[in-house]
Image (cartoon, rainbow, N blue to C red):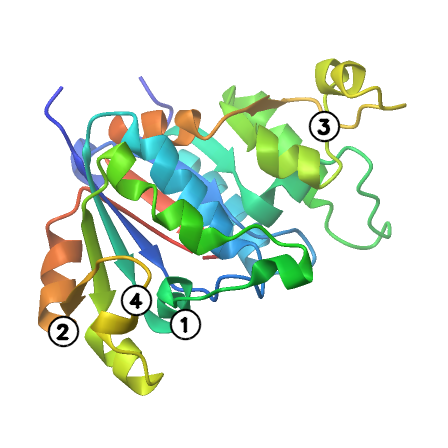
Amino acid sequence: MTPKTLTFIARSTPYGNGRAKALLDMVLSAAVFDQTINLLFMDDGVWQLARNQQPATIDAKDLSAALGALPLYDVNNVYVEARALDERGLTPQALAVDAKPCDDTEIAALIAGSDQVFAL
Amino acid sequence: MQANQPPGNTVVKLTVVVHSAPYSSQAAYSAYRFTASALEAGHEVHRVFFYYDGVHASNALSTPPQDEFDLVKAWQALIEQHELDAISCVSSALKRGILDAREAHRYEKQAANLAEGFVLSGLGQLVDASLSSDRVVSFGA
């Protein structure tokens, strides 16, 4: 079977609800299927990339630590919506994970080039 | 041969993903209506995958008032009628207190409450389904 391109879009804050963790679990599950995986952080999802998260204070697991394991799963196509960073006072240099900043046109192309798209 | 053929005989193979809970979100009901309509139109529903809060649709103990729509029963009827492959994500379900007999035994719980017709399984089943479907349609994202 020809490899497919699966794009996952993280749009939620890391700890306000379970969506960030749920999406990451989807990405890691998909990663073992030898397909092309894209991971895009948009909207409030860019907060998942913030450094120095201290979720232990709310008895939560550190999501950014799990994100750091993505290269081990061969998930290397990681993108971030540049405008969402800008709106929230974050910079690409201040992120816990390497992510390629994208504008709307690039994001549209990423989605158009995908066989399936999942967003949470 | 399907009972109904869509216009142009283009049968689309679908995977439906449900992320939100009955009664909390309209999306849970919309997912049901979409699936029923797609089948009615002659399309193929390869798998329905209940994930995150969506797994509440597979709770046999869900007991809405009698004058309200019973989404769990409605899904069960649809699953039975069309022999649908309906999977509730096992990790999402266990966290939310939805267990089949095997998991109840394994975790030494007093009761099992996975609604008949649903199967607990892993996220790999969603990935696998999405790779062999023409379209994945998600509700409640």
Judged by depth in the image, the label closer to the viewer, 4 or 2, is 4
Residue depicted at 67% across the width and 62% down the height:
A58
Q: Which residue is mark 3?
A: B115
Q: Which residue is mark 4?
A: A95
Residue depicted at 41% across the width and 69% down the height:
A47
Task: Please tell me which of labels 4 and 2 falls first in the chain.
Answer: 4
Three-letter amino acid code at disc 3?
A: Ala
Q: Give the chain of mark 2.
A: A
What distance separates the C-alpha of mark 1 from that of mark 3? Answer: 35 Å
Q: Which residue is mark 2?
A: A103
Q: Which residue is mark 1?
A: A44
What distance separates the C-alpha of mark 1 from that of mark 2? Answer: 16 Å
Residues under numbered marks 3 and 4 in contact, where contact means CB atoms less than 8 Å apart:
no
* Same chain shared by disc 1 and disc 3: no
Three-letter amino acid code at disc 2?
A: Asp
What distance separates the C-alpha of mark 3 from that of mark 4? Answer: 43 Å
Task: Please tell me which of labels 1 and 2 falls first in the chain.
Answer: 1
